Image (tube, grey):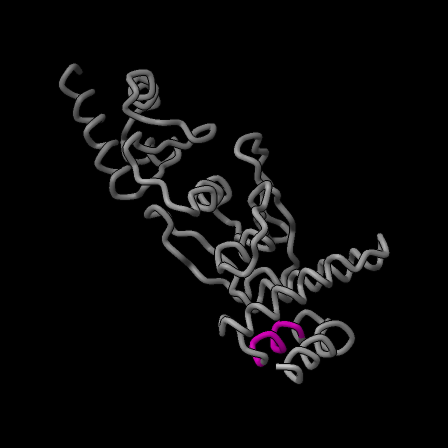
C-alpha cells in the first residue's frame, strides 16, 4: 500500500501535465483515489481551482484561464456573449463573469466559485457556429465571431422588448463593425446565422447594410 500511494501521485501529476486540469471524477476513472488527491492538495502538490477541479501549482496560466475552468465545470457548455467576444478580441470589456450557453435540457450545475453566468439556448441555436480551442490543454467550445454577434442581437431584441433598452443593439452593432473591420466575420456569415435565428430582416439586415455601405 505504501508503494501504491506514490504511484498514484505520480500518475496524477502525469495526467495533469497532459490534460491541464482535471475533475475528481476523472481521477477516479483513472484509478486514483479521492484520498490521494486530498493528500496531494494538503501537501501543496495540487491546487484546487473550484470544488472538485484541480491543476498543478506550476501550471502556466494563459490569458483565457477562466474559460478553461468554465469548460471543465460545465462540460456541455459553450462560451458565448461577451466572453466569446473577448476571446476573439472584439471588445475592450472585461466580463465580470464567464458567459456559458447550455442546451434547453442540459443539466445546470450550481457553481459558486468562479463566477459563471449560465444561459439556455434553444435547439436551433445551441449547436450552430461552435469552434473548439485549446486553452491550457483543455478543449474549450466557443461560438464563432459571426454567431456571437447574432446571439448578441437576439439578446438585444429581448432587452428592447422587455426593458425598452437599446444598449444591447448598440453593443452588438459595435461588435459587428469591429468583426467586419478586422476580417473576423463576413457579411454572409452574419446573415446566415441571423436568418436561422429569425432576426435577419428587422434587426440585423438594416444595421449590416448601413455598415457595409459606409465601409
* Residue 119 relative to residue 166: left or right: left
Q: Is residue 1 magenta?
A: no
Say which of 30 and 155 sits in front: 155
State the extent of the magenta-drawn residues as a range: 188-194
Q: Residue furthest bottom?
A: 213
Residue at (54, 77) in percent of width and height:
186
* Residue 163 relative to residue 38: left or right: right
Q: Give how far across and how far down residue 214 sits, in percent.
A: 66, 82
For residue 40, which quarter of the picture? Answer: top left
Relative vertical location of residue 107 with respect to residue 52 in this rendering, above or below: below
For residue 92, which quarter of the picture? Answer: bottom right
Q: Residue furthest left?
A: 3
* Residue 188 relative to residue 62: left or right: right
* Residue 79 relative to residue 206: left or right: left
Residue at (32, 48) in percent of width and height:
137
Relative vertical location of residue 46 with respect to residue 158 in this rendering, above or below: above
Quarter holding the C terminus is bottom right
Q: Give how far across and how far down residue 69 sits, in percent.
A: 45, 40
Q: Give how far across and how far down residue 22 sits, in percent.
A: 36, 37
Q: Main secondary structure of the magenta part?
A: helix
For residue 164, which quarter of the picture? Answer: bottom right
Residue at (21, 32) in percent of width and height:
11
Relative vertical location of residue 115 with respect to residue 104 in this rendering, above or below: above
Say which of 67 and 93 sits in front: 93
Residue at (60, 74) in percent of width and height:
190
Query: How many numbered tags mark residues here?
Result: 0
Quarter holding the N terminus is top left
Amino acid at each position: 500500500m505504501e508503494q501504491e500511494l506514490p504511484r498514484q501521485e505520480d500518475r496524477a501529476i502525469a495526467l495533469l501535465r497532459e490534460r491541464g486540469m482535471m475533475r475528481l471524477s476523472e481521477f477516479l476513472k483513472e484509478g486514483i483515489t479521492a484520498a490521494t488527491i486530498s493528500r496531494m492538495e494538503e501537501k501543496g502538490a495540487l491546487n484546487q481551482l473550484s470544488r472538485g477541479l484541480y491543476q498543478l501549482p506550476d501550471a502556466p496560466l494563459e490569458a483565457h484561464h477562466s474559460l478553461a475552468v468554465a469548460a471543465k465545470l460545465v462540460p456541455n457548455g459553450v462560451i458565448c456573449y461577451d466572453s466569446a467576444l473577448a476571446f476573439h478580441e472584439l471588445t475592450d470589456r472585461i466580463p465580470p463573469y464567464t458567459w456559458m450557453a447550455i442546451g434547453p435540457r442540459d443539466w445546470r450545475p450550481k457553481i459558486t466559485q468562479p463566477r459563471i453566468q449560465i444561459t439556455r439556448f434553444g435547439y436551433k441555436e445551441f449547436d450552430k457556429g461552435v469552434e473548439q480551442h485549446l486553452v491550457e490543454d483543455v478543449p474549450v467550445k466557443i461560438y464563432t465571431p459571426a454567431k456571437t454577434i447574432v446571439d448578441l442581437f437576439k439578446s438585444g431584441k429581448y432587452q428592447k422588448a422587455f426593458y425598452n433598452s437599446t444598449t444591447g443593439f448598440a453593443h452588438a452593432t459595435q461588435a459587428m463593425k469591429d468583426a467586419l473591420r478586422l476580417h473576423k466575420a463576413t457579411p454572409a456569415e452574419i446573415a446566415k446565422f441571423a436568418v436561422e435565428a429569425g432576426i435577419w430582416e428587422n434587426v440585423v439586415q438594416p444595421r449590416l447594410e448601413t455598415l457595409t455601405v459606409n465601409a
